[in-house]
Image (spheres, helix red, strand yellow):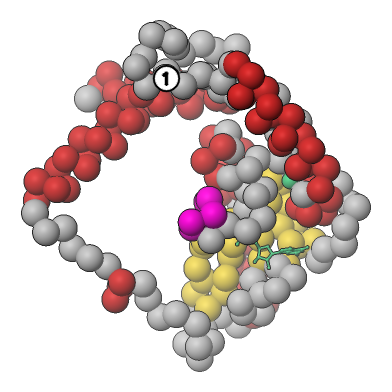
């Protein structure tokens, strides 16, 4: 268990700093790595996509937005098509396609400003609650493929969803949960063997 925890920590450190190596990179059966033609084609496609990405354009000041906050790493803007007044987006200035592809150090910065921003947004909109939403991937509803977090201020009378509770399905057998937990822990260990993607987010 301790070994697994160290593996995950090592993986996170190496993503933030490509010069820190993760041991046994290519020998893992599940280590995909990032070399090869497919990876190069992927990076070229990303470069083209970045040129047209609306959030990159906003970050570069080429498209207008109501900016609420900015630091070296990220900015927060009002959503142009809000679910509720004050619906805002926290966006890294660099381009990452999804939360999953965003380096932990950047995710950490995005998350660190949630309390500051959410409290200001709630005060301004006279809300006492908010939803924090991240759509990561098309099946999860992601439309703009540049990482972002939604802050959606909520009020009792806003007529949006109350809770996702009614959609939940309990496990039919405890073994099902145990197998799934094993599988996920296994993937956490494997993740240590994946190399960080170089050249991302520049
Ligand atoms: P997703 O479904 O990808 O998580 O959400 C994308 C969000 O970006 C949507 O809430 C959408 O309204 C918002 N959005 C899309 N284009 C623009 C834009 O040009 N400016 C701003 N401020 N928000 C945008
Ligand atoms: Zn972008």
Q: Quadrant of the C terminus?
A: top right
Residue 63 vertical position relative to residue 158 in the rendered view, above or below: above
Residue 136 in magenta stretch: yes
Residue 105: percent from the left, percent from the top?
58, 34
Ligand 1 occupies quarter: bottom right
Image point 44% across, 10% down: which residue? 26
Residue 76 in magenta stretch: no
Image point 55% across, 45% down: which residue? 99
Mark 1 lies on residue: 31
Left or right of 182 on screen, residue 122: right
- Numbered range of the magenta stretch: 134-140
Residue 116: percent from the left, percent from the top?
61, 59
Residue 84: percent from the left, percent from the top?
62, 79
> Mark 1: which secondary structure?
loop
Mark 1, residues whose alpha carbon is within 10 Å: few (<14), some, or many (≥20)? some
Q: Is residue 134 visible?
A: no
Residue 46: percent from the left, percent from the top?
71, 36
Left or right of 92 on screen, residue 1: left
Question: Is 189 or 108 nearer to us in this picture?
Answer: 189
Q: Quadrant of the N terminus?
A: top left
Image point 36% across, 72% down: which residue? 164
Left or right of 22 on screen, residue 55: right
Residue 3 vertical position relative to residue 71 in the rendered view, above or below: above
The residue furthest right is 62
Image point 81% across, 48% down: which residue? 52
Quadrant of res 37: top right
Question: Is 34 or 81 nearer to us in this picture?
Answer: 34
């Amino acid at each position: 268990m301790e070994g697994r925890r160290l593996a995950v920590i090592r993986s996170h450190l190496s993503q933030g700093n490509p010069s820190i190596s993760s041991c046994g990179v290519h020998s893992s059966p599940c280590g995909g790595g990032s070399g090869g033609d497919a990876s190069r084609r992927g990076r070229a496609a990303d470069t083209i996509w970045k040129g047209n990405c609306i959030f990159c354009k906003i970050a570069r000041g080429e498209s207008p937005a109501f900016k609420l906050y900015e630091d070296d790493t990220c900015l927060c803007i009002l959503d142009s098509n809000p679910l509720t007044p004050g619906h805002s987006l926290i966006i890294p200035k660099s381009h990452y396609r999804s939360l999953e592809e965003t380096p932990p150090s950047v995710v950490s910065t995005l998350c660190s400003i949630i309390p500051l921003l959410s409290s200001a947004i709630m005060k301004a909109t006279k809300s006492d609650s908010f939803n924090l939403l991240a759509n990561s991937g098309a099946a999860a509803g992601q439309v703009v493929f540049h990482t972002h977090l939604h802050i959606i201020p909520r009020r009792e009378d806003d007529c949006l969803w109350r809770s996702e509770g009614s959609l939940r399905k309990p496990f039919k057998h405890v073994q099902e949960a145990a197998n799934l937990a094993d599988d996920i822990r296994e993937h956490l260990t494997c993740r240590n063997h994946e190399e960080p993607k170089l050249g991302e987010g520049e």
